[in-house]
Image (cartoon, rainbow, N blue to C red):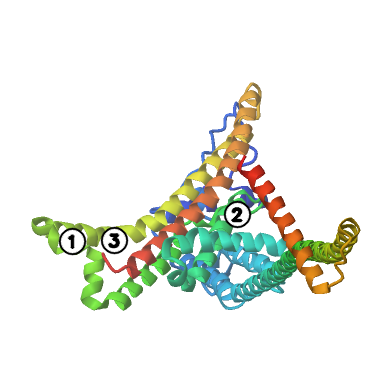
Amino acid sequence: MTALTHLASEEMENPLLPPMPELIIGLIAFLIVFLFLGKKLLPNINKVLDERRAAIEGGMEKAEAAQAEAQQVLEDYRAQLADARHEAARLRQEAQEQGVALIAEMRSEGQRQREEIIAAGHAQIEADRKAASATLRQDVGQLAIDLAGRIVGESLADSARQSRTIDRFLDALEEKSVDVTKAEATR
Amino acid sequence: MSADQTLLAFETDCHIFDGCGFPAPGLHSFVFEPLFTIGGFEFNKPMLLAILGSLVVVGFFWAAFGRAKVVPGKLQMIGEAGYDFVRRGLVYEALGKKEGEKYVPLMVSLFFFIWMMNLWSIIPVASFPVTSIIAYPAGLALLVYVLWVGLTFKKHGFVGAWKNMTGYDKSLGGILPLVVVLEFFSNLIIRPFTHAVRLFANMFAGHMLIVMFTIASWYLLNGIGIAYASASFVMTIVMTAFELFIQAVQAYVFVLLACNYVQGALSEHH
């Protein structure tokens, strides 16, 4: 019998009965771990983990801020672009309107000038006609008188009689022509 | 008694067909001669392993978290992974983040301490799981038990605590006395016992298996027995790998149960 088996047979009666020295050593060993981890090392790592989270969140905040700024710039740029487009469209519209207005103005001006010219022509013609008519009437009267004087041999120098006779003659002539035109019209 | 025998705990010159019986492992495999004695206090190998183990755990976390940095090194990363595993996977899961924060250090310490104590089983030369001696798991289970009872009384008051621990519920009617008696025994007497024994028995059996196959590999190393010895040796390797798994699982289970007990003490209903 060795000392080992002797010792064993003496103490191995119940393996579920905890021997006190082992219990104490076990608890001491655990308390060593618990104290070091609980007091020093885990608070240590917790602090670092918090710092890391803060750092990561800070980085994310920065990234978010940068993104927001980029977004803002993009929106500004887009707004400016839209403004420019509107402005260009407005200018085009305006130019178009001005062009139309100009054309209309020029057209009306031309119309006016044309009418003026036409009216002036008419007036001129009328005046010429009147002048011609007056001259003609005088010349025709003179010629008629001369002719009649030669034929009749009677001097019709008496101006009063002269003019009365001419006028009567001319009136009769006019009446005749009016009758002719009337008759043409009715026919 | 030679130095070899102290280390290996079985007779080294014994083989099959040598007229020598199989030196089967047994309860004596878990009893150690004192390494030294101070004033009647016998300091043995498991005690040495327990102290060394706690130093290893502290040493590891000191190396990992001692000078922790925001940008972690390799060791710190491993430490953080282990720490987070227990913190999130066990404590927050059972107790919630707010309630659980206070118990994180205890549970982390428990997990890594138990794991290390178990791991000694497959570390050469040590080759002995400290937790296969009932005193070590019993001490830890006792701690959890005291914490649980203390928390229950603190949270629910004297009467409330008894109601909580005995599952007192008026709506049970006639079977209430039976339930109260059963719950009392279950929670206050059997539960701490099973809490300790679950860990102890797993490690005890695991160590027994490994020792068994190790001794057999050596014992069979004679004549035709060599063929069987190789099979036994393969089994030793397989059981060692299996133990590596079981050790972590048992540490996990112990801490999981501890978390559940604390949760039971803190919960409003019983």
Q: Assess disc 3: are there few (<14), some (14-19) or many (≥20) residues with their C-alpha within 10 Å of its C-alpha.
A: some
Asked if B85 appears above or below A2 in the picture, the reply is below
Q: Which mark is residue B187?
A: 3
At mark 3, the secondary structure is helix
Question: Which quadrant would residue A126 be assigned to in this image?
Answer: bottom right
Amino acid, disc 2 = Trp
Q: Which mark is residue A154?
A: none
Chain ID, mark 2: B
The residue that label 2 is drawn on is B120
Separation of marks 2 and 3 at Cα, in angstroms: 31 Å
Chain ID, mark 3: B
Q: Assess disc 1: are there few (<14), some (14-19) or many (≥20) residues with their C-alpha within 10 Å of its C-alpha.
A: some
Q: Earlier in the sequence, mark 1 or mark 3?
A: 1
Left or right of residue A61, residue A98 in this image: right
| Residue closest to the eye, B185 or A98 | A98
Q: Which mark is residue B180?
A: 1
Please name the residue shown 58% across and 62% down the image: B84
At mark 1, the secondary structure is helix
Asked if B128 appears above or below A76 in the picture, the reply is above
Foreground disc of the pair 2, 3: 3
Please name the residue shown 60% across and 54% down the image: B120
Question: Which quadrant would residue A117 be assigned to in this image?
Answer: bottom right
Left or right of residue B126, residue A113 in this image: right
Separation of marks 1 and 3 at Cα, in angstroms: 10 Å
